[in-house]
Image (cartoon, helix red, strand yellow):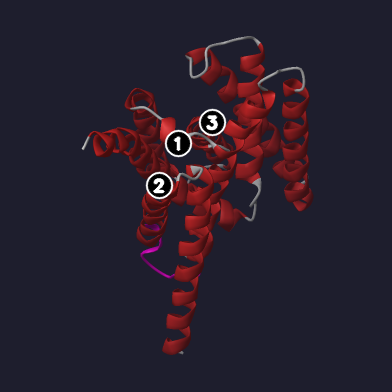
Amino acid sequence: MNEILMDLDILGPALLTGILVTATHVPLGQRVLQRGIIFLDLAVAQIAGLGIIIAYSFHLQPGGWQVQLIAMLAAISGVILLNFTERHWPDIQEALIGSLFVLASSGSILLLTANPHGGEQLKELLIGQILWVTYDQLIFVSILYAIILGLWFNLSKHASALKFYLLFAITITASVQLIGIYLVFASLILPALAIRNMSKYTIRMGYIISGSAYILGLILAATFDLPAGSVIVFSLALLALLTGALIGKYKKQKL
């Protein structure tokens, strides 16, 4: 009984994290796919990660407001730069996004070279530590995500590229510190890919795919003692693939 309660103490915050990430990342991921800037989320997540590593190099407290501020400033600086490049060189925007990702990744590795715990910090940055998220961490994130969702659904139809980039940067900065870069990318893109051919109920189906994947991934990770972030990524891929195939089959039957 104690083991079950302990698992619930761990899985409860992780499940709530999955719900919060799903709520924000599904609509944002749709917009990323529609705009054709697939690697935007990966680049912004990596820039936010670079900000976190810079903060750690000053021996700041992990999860503290100083770390949050530096990571957010880094991400916002990155999206302001990308907004500038989109206005001036839209034909090579995807290439510029990829280049910025490589630069941020390389900068992160360089900063961690002299750190004896650099390998572990890089691993946490990439695959996250969703099973170690606490309810206290989620209080601020819940408020932040609620504000972002309110702004998004009220402004998304009329939002400029810069407003989209800024909302995106703030969201990704919070998410990277909870679930890691890989899971941020998967949560944004995989549900969006699965529902791209749907004509209605797209948001609902995206929420179902993402929420189900987080539940399935956490259960499998806890059952087989596997890294939760990586298992959830594969769960998202599997459910997105199955959903996409079913949608394609249904559309063919209607023709």
* Image quadrant occupied by the N terminus: top left
Which is nearer the eye, 217 or 37? 217
- The residue depicted at 77 percent of the width and 53 percent of the height is 91
Kind of residue indicated by mark 1? Ile
Asked if disc 1 and disc 2 are in contact, CB closer than 8 Å, the reply is: yes
Which of pointers 2 and 3 indicates the residue nearer the eye?
2
Kind of residue indicated by mark 2? Leu
- The residue depicted at 51 percent of the width and 30 percent of the height is 177
Please report the bounds of the magenta region as a residue range. Answer: 197-203
Secondary structure under tag 2 reads helix
Is residue 253 depicted above or below 153 in this figure? below
Q: Closer to the N terminus: mark 1 or mark 2?
A: 1
Tell me the CA gap for discs 1 and 3.
15 Å
Which of pointers 1 and 3 indicates the residue nearer the eye?
1
Disc sitting over residue 173 in the figure? 3
Disc sitting over residue 218 in the figure? 2
Is residue 153 depicted above or below 66 in this figure? below
Q: Please give the count of numbered marks on the rendered protein.
A: 3
Specify few, some or many for label 1: CA neighbours under 10 Å numbering under 14, 14-19, or 20 or more.
many
Residue 187 x %, y %? 50, 49
Q: Which residue is mark 1?
A: 130
Q: Closer to the N terminus: mark 2 or mark 3?
A: 3
> Can I make out residue 73 in this image?
no
Which is nearer the eye, 21 or 37? 21
Secondary structure under tag 1 reads helix
Residue 24 x %, y %? 42, 43
Secondary structure under tag 3 reads helix
> Can I make out residue 244 in this image?
yes
